[in-house]
Amino acid sequence: PEIFVYVIQVGAFRTSEDAQSQRAKLSLWGIEAKVSERDLNGSVLYRVRIGPFEEIKEAEKNKAETYGGGIRYRDGSNKKLEAQSPNV
């Protein structure tokens, strides 16, 4: 059987600084995100992702909490994540 790993991309940016800024904002909400680089037609695209998740249900739950129902802060309060358009 094939093994899949799921990630949620929460942003894509043209500069490393913008990607790191988004990663830091997520960190304040208790979400560990990673920045990865991808070549896109000779330019570098910086992707901000959370995960990996072994189960698709776990990834979908985290996606729903991040994009739909808001972020659960470390103190237990529930606040919406500000939408931020990528610089792409």
Image: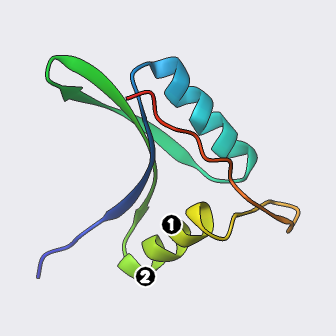
Give coordinates of residue 78: x percent, y percent.
81, 67
Residue drawn at x 65%, y 45% is: 26
Q: Which amino acid is tagged 2?
A: Lys
Specify the quadrant of the image occupied by residue 43.
Answer: top left
Frontmost of labels 2 and 1 is: 1
Residue drawn at x 73%, y 51% is: 29
Name the residue carrying label 2. Answer: 57
Q: Which amino acid is tagged 1?
A: Lys
Question: Secondary structure under badge 1?
Answer: helix
Of 11 and 83, the residue lying toward us: 83
**Horizontal side of residue 62 vs 27, given as left or right:** left
Of 31 and 78, the residue lying toward us: 78
60 in relation to 17, above or below: below
**Horizontal side of residue 6 vs 76, given as left or right:** left
Give coordinates of residue 58: x percent, y percent.
47, 77
Which quadrant, please, contains the N terminus? bottom left
Residue drawn at x 14%, y 23% is: 41
Give coordinates of residue 3: x percent, y percent.
20, 73
53 in relation to 86, above or below: below
- Earlier sequence position, callout 2 versus callout 1: 2
